[in-house]
Image (cartoon, grey):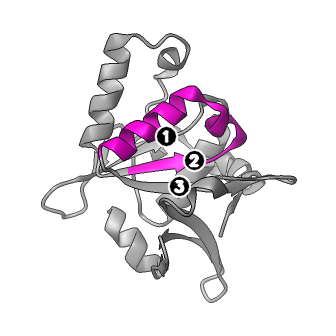
């Protein structure tokens, strides 16, 4: 269920700027649009693009603000306050666990903020050839993975809740 980083990087080749919604939420006939905050290291932009490709195949949509690079380097009171406000307003908080995001003080702060604000936190664990990332969070938070559907001959995004497995389609529908 852990997502292979090489798979994300490979999927990034199928990414196009048209996949970005340009809006922080998505509305698919719901009374209120759901919002997803994606916490990641900007060093992992390729993997984030691959993740977007995975999620778009499932009909999921979310906004990733690629313009927040200056916040990572020089966060000031205004930037931190704005980030905290966005985290408080989101319905879901996704953390893409990689070596870079786990080492990032900024990502750790965002995770702590989401936890303190009681957001619906989902870890997206990844692995490379030698290591797995995000395992330390799996007992605490829900997580998202990829499962290969042999019948449909494609990968499906699935969600696990602490101790409870959700069928893929049901889990994805929740985020819409």
Image: magenta residue range: 93-117
Q: Which residue is mark 2?
A: 96
Question: Does residue 58 belong to the magenta stretch?
Answer: no
Near mark 1 (Cα within 10 A), the count class, few <14, some 14-19 or many ≥20, is: many
Q: Where in the figure is residue 17, as x and y percent of width and height?
A: 51, 38
In the displayed structure, 99 sits above or below 34; it is above
The image's mark for residue 123 is: 3
The image's mark for residue 95 is: none
Alpha-carbon span between mark 1 and mark 3: 10 Å
Sequence order check, earlier mark of 1 and 2: 1
Quick one: which residue is furthest to the left in this view?
A: 31
The image quadrant of residue 98 is top right
Q: Would you say the residues marked 3 and 2 are in contact, meaning their CB atoms lie under 8 Å apart?
A: no
Q: Would you say the residues marked 1 and 3 are in contact, meaning their CB atoms lie under 8 Å apart?
A: no
The image's mark for residue 39 is: 1
Q: Is residue 86 visible in this depiction of the protein? A: yes
In the displayed structure, 62 sits above or below 138; it is above
User: In which quadrant of the rendered image does the C terminus lie?
Assistant: bottom left
How many badges with numbers are in the image?
3
Q: Would you say the residues marked 1 and 2 are in contact, meaning their CB atoms lie under 8 Å apart?
A: yes
Q: Where in the figure is residue 125, as x and y percent of width and height?
A: 63, 56
Q: Where in the figure is residue 53, as x and y percent of width and height?
A: 56, 54
Q: Regarding mark 2 in the picture, which secondary structure is present there?
A: strand
Alpha-carbon span between mark 3 and mark 2: 6 Å
Sequence order check, earlier mark of 1 and 3: 1
Sequence order check, earlier mark of 3 and 2: 2
């Amino acid at each position: 269920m852990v997502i292979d980083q090489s798979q994300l990087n490979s999927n990034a080749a199928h990414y196009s700027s048209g996949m970005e919604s340009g809006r922080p939420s998505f509305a698919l006939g719901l009374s209120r649009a759901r919002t997803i905050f994606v916490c990641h290291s900007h060093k992992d932009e390729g993997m984030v693009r691959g993740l977007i490709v995975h999620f778009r195949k499932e009909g999921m949509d979310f906004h990733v603000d690629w313009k927040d690079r200056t916040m990572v380097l020089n966060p000031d009171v205004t930037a931190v306050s704005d980030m905290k406000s966005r985290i408080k307003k989101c319905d879901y908080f996704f953390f893409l666990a990689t070596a870079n995001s786990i080492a990032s003080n900024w990502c750790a702060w965002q995770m702590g903020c989401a936890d303190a604000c009681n957001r619906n936190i989902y870890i997206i664990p990844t692995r490379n050839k030698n290591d797995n990332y995000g395992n330390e969070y799996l007992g605490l938070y829900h997580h998202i993975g990829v499962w290969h559907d042999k019948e449909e001959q494609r990968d499906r995004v699935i969600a696990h809740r602490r101790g409870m497995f959700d069928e893929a389609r049901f889990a994805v529908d929740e985020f819409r």
